[in-house]
Image: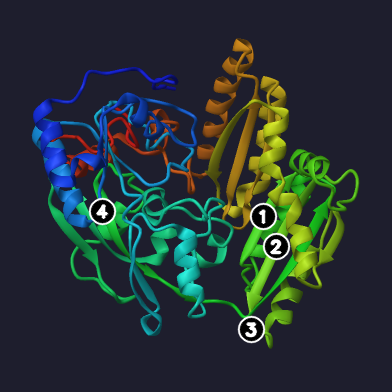
Amino acid sequence: MSAPATTPVPRGPLPPAAVARLQAALGAERVLTDPAECLAYGYDNSKRVALPQAVAFAQSHDEVVAVVQVCNAFALPLVVRGRGTNTTGATVPIAGGVVLSLERMNRILRISPGDRLIECEAGVLNGDVQAAAAAHGLFWAPDPTSLAYSTVGGNLGCCAGGPRAVKYGTARDNVLGLRAVTGAGTSIKTGCTTTKGVVGYDLTRLLVGSEGTLGIITEATLKLLPKPQTTKTLRACYADVRSAAEAVSRVMNQPETPSALEFLDGDAVQLAEAYQPTGVPAGVGAMLLMEVDGQPASIDVALRAVVAAAEGPGLVELKSAANAAETEALWACRKALSPSLRRIAPKKVNEDVVVPVTRIPELVTGLAALSRKHGIRIVNFGHAGNGNMHTNLLADPEDPAQMQAVQACLREVFRLVLDLEGTLSGEHGVGIEKRDFVGWEIAADTLDVMRALKKTLDPRGILNPGKALPD
């Protein structure tokens, strides 16, 4: 696996003419060149660091165009950035150059409740979109854990999902159109303001998930959905992971789709329970957290259907929340996971692999075997309703033998996922972390088509170089 610098490596300054043109477009106060000031924009939640040579702050689509045109003229690497919450190194400027921050492009431009859409700039926080939509009884489907801090542009860049994706889809399913700038500095507008539209090629879905390698998204028209009037929450505990995985298949193979279906293996349950006790029975081997939503008149029908599917071999306890406080208590175990993992291992390799729902039992069995084979603790939890598993390999980065075992184990994890007809990333994206494995999943001739698309939209290869596609 390739790795960029983990400590900031100084590079020479940008050409003075390039700095002058950036300052003329944005104003001197919105162009940083001091390494000490640029450092904060050289890392993201992957904990990787590389020092940019400059940081530019755009406040409008036209200013983004100007920045791209300067970088294109001088062949400067250009990395677009929201708030840096991604975990794959997608916003780390490994080639130096310019980081373009869109954090100041944070305006909601228009909301049309009757058309169920909202138009906003790329730097708007997901949580701010949710608040604006909620005022009209609506919501935007993507709900990543980072929604209070991550931007719409970032969510679209990696095609974020979250627990609700099992019923309502990911970012790609909930965007109507985009305004963007190609690597050549050309403005494009994709999609439309209607939920139906087949005129021209679907450039919207092409840009979503492209991690800023094909174009810079500056504005988005998002599809909103009506907020459910009521929600019911269930917690099902099982004797072992296979029983829970088989229950997932049963739940997803009946007509009432839950609005969330989260899986925690035995290690995850025990770690979370030790961090914050929530009354989970002792010795539980796996747990499912499920929600159903809808109208008051029909919610009980949906709840009974999900309960019936959850019941089966290996069930230890099935508990339903009677009120908001009990709902919060049932979810507490899931929310305690990330801090509990940080307590037991200084290094967490967090993958977001996906397999078909019917193959989840094989996945969890295979992961347990790999854990034993390599002597690496693997903790699994995630959005089981659509087969999206967050597989966490825990290790001590100060132990070279352990880190070597992690890399060997990770390669076998990816092979297992692909053998089960799965994919290497469901919502985190590729970035740096998975780039060298993309060729395992995508055939060479298909990769050639993707590279040709990259060349068309980014002829000088300035946009986020070294990300998403293997060399």
The answer to whether residue 183 is seen in the rendering is no
Q: In this view of the protein, which residue sits in the foreground, 345 or 262?
A: 345
Which circle's residue, 4 or 1, is located before the other in the chain?
Answer: 4
The answer to whether the residue labelled 2 contacts the one labelled 1, judged by CB atoms less than 8 Å apart, is yes
Element carrying mark 3: loop
- The amino acid beneath tag 4 is Gln
Marks 2 and 1, how far apart at CA? 6 Å
Q: Which residue is mark 4?
A: 59
**Quarter of image, res 273:** top right
Marks 3 and 1, how far apart at CA? 22 Å
On the image, the x and y values in percent for residue 198 come to 24, 71
Label 2 Cα crowd, 10 Å radius (few <14 / some 14-19 / many 20+): many
Label 3 Cα crowd, 10 Å radius (few <14 / some 14-19 / many 20+): few
Identify the mark at residue 387; answer none if there is no mark: none
- The answer to whether residue 239 is above or below residue 463 is below
Label 4 Cα crowd, 10 Å radius (few <14 / some 14-19 / many 20+): many
- The amino acid beneath tag 1 is Glu
Identify the mark at residue 290; answer none if there is no mark: 2
Q: Which residue is mark 1?
A: 262
Q: In this view of the protein, which residue sits in the foreground, 218 or 199?
A: 218
The answer to whether the residue labelled 2 contacts the one labelled 3, judged by CB atoms less than 8 Å apart, is no
Q: Which residue is mark 3?
A: 295
The type of colouring in the image is rainbow
- Callout in the foreground (4, 2): 4
Which circle's residue, 2 or 1, is located before the other in the chain?
Answer: 1
- The amino acid beneath tag 2 is Met
Element carrying mark 4: loop
The answer to whether the residue labelled 4 contacts the one labelled 1, judged by CB atoms less than 8 Å apart, is no
Residue sitting at the far top: 400
